[in-house]
Image (cartoon, grey):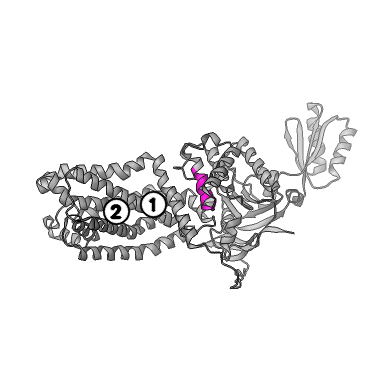
Amino acid sequence: MTTIAQPASLPETVPQDRVGPLAAIRHTLTLAWRSLVQIRHNPMELGDLSLQPLMFVVLFAYVFGGAIAGSPKAYLQFGLAGIICQNALFLTMNTGMALNTDITKGVFDRFRSLPIARSAPLAGRIVADVVRQVWSMAILMAVGTLLGFRIQTNPVDVLAAVALLVAFTLGFSWLPVLVAMLVDEPEKVMMLGFVVVFPLTFISSAFVPVETMPGWLQAWAGVNPTSLLVDAVRGLLVGGEVAAPALGALAWAAAIGAVFAPLALWAFRRRS
Amino acid sequence: MDYTIDAHGLVKRFGATTALDGVDLAARTGTVLAVLGPNGAGKTTAVRILATLVRPDGGRALVGGHDVVAQAQQVRRLIALTGQYAAVDESLTGVENLLLIGRLLGLSRAAARRRAAELLERFSLADAGGRATKTYSGGMRRRLDLAASLVGRPRVLYLDEPTTGLDPRARGDLWAVIRDLTAGGVTVLLTTQYMEEADQLADDVVVIDRGRVVAVGTPDQLKAQVGRQVLRVSPVRAADVPVVARVVTDLAGAAPEVDGEAVSAQVGDPRVPPAVLQRLTDAEVAVAELSLRKPSLDEVFFALTGHHTDQEADHDDDRSAA
C-alpha cells in the first residue's frame, strides 16, 4: 500500500459554519414532530401507548389486587406507582427500536447528510419520547383514578413524580440505545425489554412489598434501582419517604447514562 | 477544468479490511461521473466519505471546493444522497416525508408544502402523496427517495446504485431525471454495477475493483483502451455461414462466435474487416451485414479486472464492507 498524506489541516480562520442554537432547536422540534406524527398512521403504536398500560392497570388491580391488598382499590393505592414505573421503562425500548429502524433503513444517513445540527436526530427522538412518556403516564393515572386510585399529595408532588420518571428514563434509555446500535433489526431491541425490564421491575418494590419476598430476593430488590424509583414515585403520589429514594434513583440514572451513552456513541460511530 | 468533486488518495479501513486503497475521483461540474465496480469494490464507502458520513483514514476530498472533513457542514449544504435503500420514513405519508426534509432545510411551512407538491407531481406520486409510504411499491419508494433528495435543490447528487431492483421502465425514467438535472448544472456521482447505465449516462467512468481504481476515462476511451473491436458478419444465405466462419477464423486468428446467421469475433487489427470482405467477395459469398462495434463496457470490465460484474449478488456486501 502506498503512503497517503493525511488531510492537510485547514487554517484556523476557515469559518466552521456551525448551526446556531435557535436553528438546532428548530431542527430538533421538526424531528420530534416527525416521530410523533407517526402515531397517527400507526394505530398499533397508539395502542402500545394507551391500551397496554390500561390493560396492566385493570389486570393488576382486579387479578392480583384482591389477593395482595384485599381489594382492587386498595391495591391500586400501592401498585399504580409500580405499574407507571414499569410502563416507563418499557417505553424506553421504543426509543431503541425507532433508532434502529432509522439506521437500518438509511433514514439516519439522510439526516446526517443534511446541513442540520448534529445533535438534532437524537435530540428530536428524545423530545418525542418524553412526550410519549408523559402521555402514557397521564393515561395510567386517569385510568387508575377511574378505578379508585386517589392521589394523596398535591399537584406539585405529582409533577415532581412525572419529572423524576422522565429524568430516570432519559438516563436509562441509553441502555436500549446501545443495544439498538449493536443489533441488526429493531425486534431484537424488544428482547432486551424482556430480559432486563421484567427482572428489574418484578423483583422490586413495584408490585408487592419487598418484605414478602425470600431473603435473597429482598437483597436484590433492595439494591435494584427500580425499587428506589418506585419508592420515590409512590411517595410523591400517595405519601411516604421521597428524598432518599429519589436521589438514589437519579444517581442510578446518571450512572447508567454515564456508562451507556459513551458506549452507544462509540457503537454508532463504529457502525457507520 | 472545474471539478465539483475532487478526491485524492482516499483510504478507508474497517478493521483488517481495506475498503478503499488510495482512490482518486473527479467529477466536472454539471456532468455525471459513474463509479463502476462489483459488490464490495468500495463504491458505497467512497460515496459515504463524499457525503460526509464517514471520515477517510487517508487522502482528501473536496466537494464544491469544501473539504468533506473540515468543512462538512458547507459540503452538506450542496449535496443530497440517495442510497441503495429507499431512505424514507415508512410510517409517514409521501407528503410528510418531503415536508420533513423541507422544514429541516429551513423552508417555511408554505414553501415546504409547495415544494413537496411540485416534486410529487414530477415523480408521478401526486395521487399517493397522502398515503403512508409503507403502502408504496418498491419503485414508488425509490422515486420518493429521489424526490426527498431534490427538495433542497442540491448542486451535487450522489446516487448509490439508484436503479438496482427497478424495472426497465422505472430505470429509464430515472435516467431521464438524471439527464434533466445535469442539464440544469447539477453534478451527479452515480455508482452502478450496470455497464449499460454507465454507458447511457456517464460523461466519465471510474472503474474500481477491490478498493483500487483500475481504469478512468469516458465510456468511449475505456472501450478504446481495451483496443479490440467486435466484428460481426452475416451472409445473405444461411448456407454460407460455415464459409464466413472459416474466413473470419483465418483472418482474426481466433474461433468466432456463431449465433444463428451471424458470425462475430474480436479483432485487434484494423486491416482485418476489409480483408474479410475481400475474401468473401472472392468466394462469391453475398454479405447481408458487416459491422464493427466497440466492445460493451461489460466486456471492458472483464478485460480490466479479469472477472465479470456480478449483477445477481446481494447488495448488502458493499454496505457491510462499509
Name the residue type under label 1.
Answer: Ala
Query: Would residue B228 be counted in the magenta stretch?
Result: no
Q: Are marks 1 and 2 on the same chain?
A: yes
Name which of mark 1 and mark 2 comes first in the sequence. Answer: 2
Magenta span: predominant SS is helix
**Could you tell me how far apart the alpha carbons at marks 1 and 2 are, in whole angstroms?**
15 Å
Measured as percent of width and height from the top left, residue B101 is found at: 52, 49
Residue A230 shows which numbered tag? none
Residue A89: mark in rendering = 2
User: From the image, which quarter does the N terminus of chain A lie in?
Assistant: bottom right
Residue labelled with disc 1 = A128
Q: Say whether residue A200 is visible.
A: yes
Where residue A149 appears, as percent x and y from the top left, is 17, 47
Residue range of the region highlighted in magenta in the rendering: B96-107
Give the secondary structure at mark 2.
helix
For mark 1, does the 10 Å Cα neighbourhood hold few (<14), some (14 to 19), or many (20 or more) residues? many
User: Horizontal and vertical percent for residue A102?
Assistant: 45, 50
> What's under tag 2, amino acid-wise?
Leu
